[in-house]
Image (cartoon, coloured by chain):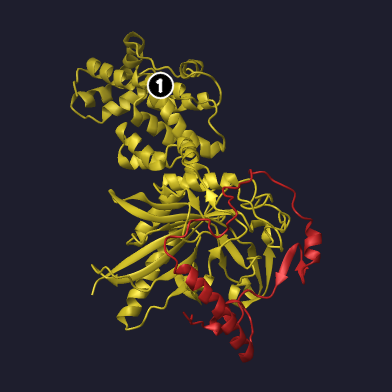
Amino acid sequence: MSWEAVIGIETHVELSTRSKMFCGCAVDFGAEPNTNICPVCLGLPGALPVPNRKAIEGIVAIGLALNCEITERSVFHRKNYFYADLPKNYQVSQFDVPVCRDGYLEIELDGETRRIGIERAHMEEDTGKSTHVGDGGRIHSASETLLDFNRSGVPLVEIVSRPDIRSAAEARAYAQELRAIVAELGVSDARLEEGSIRFDANISIRPAGSDTLGTKVEIKNMNSFRSLERAVDYEIRRQIAAVEAGQQIVQETRHWNEEAGETQSMRTKEGSSDYRYFADPDLVPLVVPPSWVEEIRASLPELPEARRKRYATLGLHPKAAAMLSSSARTIRHLFDETVAAGAPALAAFNWLTGEVTAWMRRTDTEPAELTGERLAALIALVDEGVVSATAAKEVLEGVLAGEGEPRQVAEARDLVQVSDRGALEGAVRRVLDADPDAVERLRSGEEKVIGFLVGQVMRETGGKADPRLVNELIREAVGSDG
Amino acid sequence: MPVDIDIAHVARLARLELTPEEMETYRSQLGVILEHAARVQALEGEPEVGSVHGLGIEGVFRDDEVAASLDRDEVLAAAPESRDGFFVVPPALEQ
């Protein structure tokens, strides 16, 4: 029998507000443990939470970017469970009335676009951070747990996809696109390795073509896009093997073990009713009027998908458009400026993702001296044959080092190509006179000799001759028309 | 309308150890409360969002400004056990 995987992804995004979700404690990840805590985020009796306006703007921005409906009146619920990193014994979350509902996100995979539904995005708070100490530092063998509540109460947005994902590669593409969107919005650091964006996957299998849902298993602890893809792939294969061997899939949470390359059972998952959700009596309804939504919509930046489409209309290949779209903001900004200054999109793309990006990596600095106008001017110098493609790289170095406009740099560094026939004829004559043998071989049709002779003239002119012109002059002199 | 309650399950979720007598007491007490809730739920019409409060207040926010936190030593002094600025608790997963 052939099987089909049904995958939904839950994404947690920590918002990068200055203060926490319901209190004024600082959000500061480098801080000494338990220095940003107060009665509200420690769950002390009588403390009253008040929502952070900026966090609400963050979730609305995410919802709009994911094409969601924004609920005007939504409700905070308490999700009750006992865990040491949850000081109140409940997490403030949202249940039946979340802020964002019914959106979608488009992913591109192998040249095809697929739309993945977004069921909801809701506002909640993060838990504290626990460190398990003891033999090997592993959770199962820990002898005690250390708790730091600095993260307790940090605004957290949970984004729940519909079970529209069908493969590990799609799961990865979805996660990458979602991360790109959140990063572009600037509402979160969105760093996987620091846990400011985290992905859990719900996976089940069913006979291909069936429309029933199998028992789902939740997998956690994927700290990179690669782990996510591997974990999903492993879990699909594990479930298929289990079912084909006549076993039942148990609804549970499994932990991805990167070293072992497998998912491992953690605990039997509690059903939703076990969380005994109820409306938080300390928090009044959350109201986001349409006027506020429109204000936030107006402030949204250009999102990755729209950007890729725009680059493609400028003539970039879809792969180049995707690559540029995920480049550093500086590179993208320079690209737009360079094209606006009249340069062809492809040349701007090549320079920026090639030489300029390499320079930024090498020097670990921003190209502050480079503007779109300067890059466009440099591209024009190459097109007009004023500088060679090789010399242009040196001109760029000069511009980046603050030596001024490209033409100034080319002149100051003596890189302007000699394109004047009269000036080059002497050099060509000297090279040909010095090597009659090569001339004879070229005459008799040995084509590769031309490259050697052009090289000799380039050397004679200190690399400044226009090679196309030199080629032409040699052929004229030798009487070979190639 | 009597409501069926798995009192042992509820007690386990709330981490309560109850004697059989206590289970019976709470089962009947909770039963009265849940029957009342069931009558309210049976009322016609959709409940309005926010009707749980009845305060007539909604859409309250604070600006994203940092306020002073508590003194760590004072907070940790109230904890049964602490070390190096951390709260120390028994291992998260027993068994």
Question: Can you tell which quarter of the image residue B80 is in?
Answer: bottom right
The percent position of residue A338, horizontal first and vertical second, equals 41, 26
Closer-to-camera residue (A85/A413): A85
* Residue drawn where x is 71% and y is 56% of the image: A37
Closer-to-camera residue (A108/A420): A108
Please, is residue A298 above or below residue A58 in the view?
A: above
Which residue is the extreme one toward the bottom?
Answer: B20
Closer-to-camera residue (A383/A118): A118
Q: Quadrant of the N terminus of chain A?
A: bottom left
What residue is disc 1 on? A341
The percent position of residue A337, horizontal first and vertical second, equals 43, 26
Closer-to-camera residue (A129/B77): B77
Q: In the figure, is residue A190 to the left or right of A69?
A: right
The percent position of residue A31, horizontal first and vertical second, equals 70, 53
The percent position of residue A107, horizontal first and vertical second, equals 35, 50
Identify the secondary structure beneath mark 1. loop
Question: Can you tell which quarter of the image residue B53 is in?
Answer: bottom right
Kindly tell me whether residue A255 is visible in this rendering.
no
Check disc 1: other Cα within 10 Å, few if <14, some if 14-19, many if 20+: some
**Chain drawn red, letter?**
B
Q: In the figure, is residue A244 to the left or right of B57?
A: left
The kind of residue on which mark 1 rests is: Ala
The residue marked by circle 1 belongs to what chain?
A: A
Q: Colour of chain A?
A: yellow
Kindly tell me whether residue A320 is visible in this rendering.
yes
Q: Quadrant of the C terminus of chain A?
A: top left
Please, is residue A241 above or below residue A443 in the view?
A: below
Q: In the figure, is residue A429 to the left or right of B73?
A: left
Please, is residue B5 above or below residue A333 in the view?
A: below
